Image (tube, helix red, strand yellow):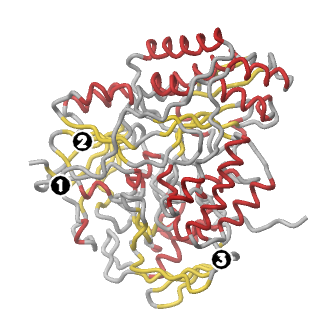
Amino acid sequence: MTIEPQPPLSAARRPRGVPARRSLAATAVLLTGLLALAACTGGAKTPVSGAANYELTATTPAPAGELGSFTWSIYAEPASLDYAHAFDYPDNQVLSNVCESLLRWNADLSVSPGLAEKWDNPTPTTWVYSIRPGVTFHDGTPLTAADVVASLQRHLDPAVGSYWNSSYTNVSSIEQTGEMQVTVTTTIPDSQFNLSMAASPGTVESAATLARDGADYGNSTAGVNCTGPFSLGKWDSGEAITLERYDAYWDKNLVAKSQQVKFVFLSDPNTRVNAFKSGEVDGGWMIPSNAIGGLKSSPNGKIYFGTSTAIASEIVTDMSGPLGDVRVRKALMMAIDRPGLVAAAEQGHAKVTDALTSRSVWNGARKEVSDGAYAGLESYPLDVAAATKLVSDAGATGKEIVIATSPLSAGADVIAQAVSSAATSIGLKPRIDSISPAKYTTLFSDAAARKGIDLLYTQWYLSTADPLDMFGVLRTGQFSNYGGWSNPEYDAVVNKAVGIADPSDRAREADKAQHIVNDELPWLPLYEVPTTVWLGSRITGVSPSINYMYFPWAATIGAQT
């Protein structure tokens, strides 16, 4: 047996908790009622609605001036600021303002020069990066090509254990090939490698700092030493991280408009929302959905909705259990009232989808090609009677499935209850396993932690505007293919697509992958969520886009008046 080289994929995106606990009981009762009604009506079918209770905004008003400081809430303390281990929303939204990558991911999800002032692809297996001169790290030392080589090579070092190693699967060498030039050679043509250079896999750190700090690099004691518009000022573990403006920043168009940013860790959704309303905290990403209505009417700020690549899904984590039978997966999908779920868990601020990708990541392809990726997808309308028969035909009636959840938010609780109710209505025996937020995060990196669990909720965002960033995850044997799903035809389609340079030609192959996944449901897509951001009355200037994970968004924020 031969093993083909595997094209890269992005690492796991951790689940996020969004809605506050207010009205949890009411929403749970509402959803249970909807599902009970479906069970009573047997074969009645409810069409899937694509309506969404929000409008996307490209940007916010330009700031009128500078700020001394502003405060920003995040729902958890970053686990690490080591770019090789920055794997979650809290980590990356801080790190994106301090450390930079070779390329930039812009608000419209396009890619442009960053620490590399240009890049070339002289052969199908060669990427050449011209490193920008005149850039300094926060300690004042100049950026060199050697720093870039050392930073990228960390992803290949087993001792580092980079969560982004899969982006380097096809890399055979990383070499300095000029005074300010770095060349990356791959074993096969790899369309995805260069795109990943706008995210964590392309982050650059001082080689001297990496050598000095070793295993302590990126923790609350050692910190980081990068090139971004802010430097890491102080990390008070358990409380806050303060960033300071770096006045020698190289990009004069992105010099920070605030001298300081303070990130405060507010794990309780109600506390975050109350801090927004009172003005104690100036802003924050990922607004609890069931607080949006109240925030819309608040005189102390405004909520914005922007471009996202995130899909809320239930990941099937055990293909050896009842859900290993595709009939049972389809049955469960047919038993979940997804429009009702959007209304209950997200208060209408989401959109039902049958795909694991949002249209925003197909923008590089011609419209007729991207439209084809969504044409003919099975919609799985609500049909409890037909779903019950599928479970019976599969011999799964009465079998237990374990649904993992965590007290991250009311939305997560509502989803778990909804999926449990749907499973019960079709003859399965569900059990909800509620675990701590810290342990829930571990489920995405530790196979042993997932033992005994059948379903795992996530809001999975993509780090590039390419559908292969999602589909690469589901190939046989990949790190984030949590259920061990395997389809040789699918693997061949995705591997072929990765080697295609033209976005439209590549999208035609990705279209095939999307239809296979839609048919086999290794993950159950629930709904598409927008990027949300709250800006208090003091601040403005940020673009409400998912690119905040890798773009120095805090530098754009200034005073409203």
* Contact check, label 1 and label 3, Cβ < 8 Å: no
Q: Is residue 297 above or below residue 229?
A: above
Which one is in front in this view, the residue at disc 1 or the one at disc 3? 1
Regarding mark 1 in the picture, which secondary structure is present there?
loop
Q: Locate residue 74: give its quadrant.
A: top left
Q: Locate residue 502: give its quadrant.
A: bottom right
Q: Residue furthest top?
A: 40
Residue drawn 29% across the image and 60% down it: 230
The residue that mark 2 highlights is 535
- Does 557 sit left or right of 157 as displayed? left
Q: Around disc 3, counting alpha carbons within 10 Å, would you say few (fewer than 14), some (14 to 19), or many (20 or more)?
A: many
* Contact check, label 2 and label 3, Cβ < 8 Å: no
Q: Look at label 1 and name its amino acid.
A: Ala
Residue drawn 50% across the image and 11% down it: 29
The residue that mark 1 highlights is 62
Could you give the CA–CA distance between mark 1 and mark 3, rounded to whole angstroms?
Answer: 42 Å
Regarding mark 2 in the picture, which secondary structure is present there?
strand
- Does 485 sit left or right of 416 as displayed? right
The image shows residue 520 at horizontal and vertical percentages of 73, 41
Which of the labelled discs sits on residue 186, or is there none?
3
| Front in this rendered view, residue 173 or 312 | 312
Q: Locate residue 43: give its quadrant.
A: top right
Give the mark nearer the N terminus: 1 vs 3. Answer: 1
Give the mark nearer the N terminus: 2 vs 3. Answer: 3
Q: Residue furthest left?
A: 561
Q: Look at label 3 and name its amino acid.
A: Thr
| Front in this rendered view, residue 425 or 179 | 425
The image shows residue 218 at horizontal and vertical percentages of 46, 57
